[in-house]
Amino acid sequence: MRTYKRVKIEGACYFFTVVLAQRQGNHLLVEHIDTLRESFRHIQKNHPFVMNAVVILPDHLHCIWQLPKGDSNFSSRWRLIKSYFSKSIKTGEYVSKSRQGKNERGIWQRRFWEHVIRDEEDYTRHVEYIHYNPVKHGYVDNVKDWKYSSFHHWVARGIYPIDWATNNRNVIDACLE
């Protein structure tokens, strides 16, 4: 069995990737976007964090969180968010024997991927990766056309122009590295 070691730094900024258990043809996250949003809001009430950037795709999501000072417990937050979401939608998904034995649903992959943001350049690269992801996966031709993204908030704050990454190979190539 693998031993997973997570870097936990109090008050750090993290990039996350969280994926559904059954990815192929699964649109659960966008079909239940309001439930997913409520899951985040509900957990943030008692376990605060700031969501700096996010993109929700049909079968996975990417986001950047800033944890409060003195707090490094992102794992509990993800467990609670996944649990809240899972309890809020109807059953019917495939559940493996392993999960059945543990009385688990078959919605989420058990683990998630995290990365500690190291500096401003690392932060910028990950924010751009998040915002460009719907184009990368072929859901839209332009970043502005994907509505389940914090990109629109960044535009409203004047950080990005609405046509960011449109016909700009440098930005596009950097996002795909």
Image (cartoon, rainbow, N blue to C red):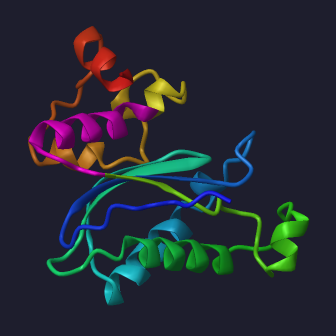
Q: Quadrant of residue 160?
A: top left
Depicted 25 relative to depicted 107: above or below? above
Q: Is residue 153 left or right of residue 21?
A: left
Residue 97 x, y percent position in the rendering: 91, 67
> What is the chief secondary structure element of the magenta stretch?
helix
Depicted 115 relative to depicted 141: above or below? below
Q: Is residue 110 left or right of residue 26?
A: left
Magenta stretch: residue 21 in it? no
Residue 170 x, y percent position in the rendering: 23, 12
Highlighted range, magenta: 116-133
Q: Is residue 37 left or right of residue 116?
A: right
Residue 77 x, y percent position in the rendering: 42, 76
Quadrant for the C terminus, please.
top left
What residue is shown at x 18% (from left), y 71% (from top)?
A: 11
Residue 82 x, y percent position in the rendering: 57, 71
Q: Quadrant of residue 41?
A: bottom left
Depicted 47 relative to depicted 10: above or below? below
